[in-house]
Image: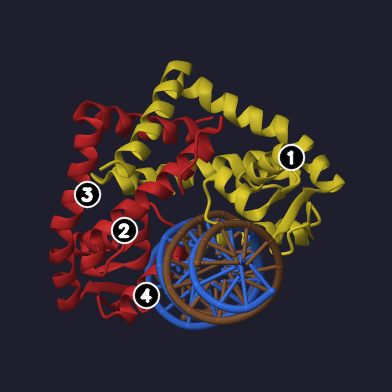
Chain colours: A yellow, B red, C blue, D brown
Amino acid sequence: MEKAASHCICINLRHTSQTITQFYDAALEPSGLKITQFSVLKAARYLEPVSISDLADYLGLDRTTLGRNLRILERDKLVALEAGRDHRERVVRVSEQGQVAYRMAYPLWKQAQNKLTQGLGKEQVQILDTLLSNLETAVHSR
Amino acid sequence: MEKAASHCICINLRHTSQTITQFYDAALEPSGLKITQFSVLKAARYLEPVSISDLADYLGLDRTTLGRNLRILERDKLVALEAGRDHRERVVRVSEQGQVAYRMAYPLWKQAQNKLTQGLGKEQVQILDTLLSNLETAVHSR
DNA sequence: CATAAAAACGAGTATATACGCGTATTTTAT
DNA sequence: ATAAAATACGCGTATATACTCGTTTTTATG
């Protein structure tokens, strides 16, 4: 990872996304979590008990994608997947171990976020957020 | 895919990147190429004959990632991978079929790119490019 | 109430991405 | 000229992501 800047918005986005992901993953390493897993735990903590589909909607992920990601968290005993009252669904709960990992990861995430924010400038981060949001809108409209 | 806007720069980037990728992939569909494959073909056309490592450097991808991506293009007969004079390396060449696919994909790519550019505004796209570039710099320094 | 429609999920398949380890080949240094 | 270092790769493993299809369960409707 080092080169970049094609003329393609998509390729540029993908490349930066990947680079930044590695940055956050490295920052979170002591917690054993990746940034994607951190974001799933965060959402699950907020919504639990929650079905896979509802959690996927919240996260903006495909249901099957989240299902596979959760399998890994379950294997690592960070979440538990139980049958809900509705026997079609499986309900996500964050385990004690999951809570511990999250609390360990949070300050690491914050540090990474701060570093980037300071590197870019607060206003620029604000502008970035707006642009990303507008991109998604531009694609979905019409 | 529909929700978004966490407070995490990384998660926001990942989500938008994925959404935009789907937009480009859908646009390129008639050509049979995905945007990632299109970008590999474009670079390979420009640099061929080129080793896997050199092409990976140019694209900002891990060598092994590109190797696997090329295997798929080879399977679909869009590129050929031959031994170079240096017997350690494998040399990438775009096949006739690859050229045809590329030429078919190009206007589709251009359309997608134009749609997005019009949706966002040219200045905003320029700002986005700058921000993405600055993000990568912010992460690599220090 | 019975059947049709809808919802929730898993499995299969496919792609993209990277890291570490091992191997073959080429270069370089002594 | 030989040994050491560097280079180019492949494979194994791991994660993230999504689509299609099929199964189970729930809900709606006539």
Instruction: Choose top left, top right, bottom left or bottom right for residue C19.
Output: bottom right
Say whether residue A107 is left or right of residue B98: right
Query: Residue A10: x percent and y percent?
Result: 32, 47
Q: Earlier in the sequence, mark 3 or mark 2?
A: 2
Picture disc at residue B72: 4
Q: Residues within 10 Å of mark 1 (few under 14, many from 20)?
A: some
The residue positioned 16% from the left and 50% from the top of the image is B110
Which mark identifies residue A45? 1
Q: Chain of mark 3?
A: B
Side (left or right) of B93 relative to C24: left
Dot 3 and dot 1 within a common chain: no
Location of residue A106 in the rendering, given as x and y in whole percent from the top left corner: 71, 33
Q: Residue, x 35% and y 47% (percent of image)?
A: B20
Residue B89: image x %, image y %?
Answer: 36, 73
Mark in front: 1 vs 4:
1
Rendered residue at 18%/77% (across/down): B97
The residue at which mark 2 appears reads as B25
In the rendered view, tell whether residue B80 sits above or below residue B66: below
The amino acid type of the residue labelled 4 equals Ile
Are dots 2 and 1 on a single chain? Answer: no
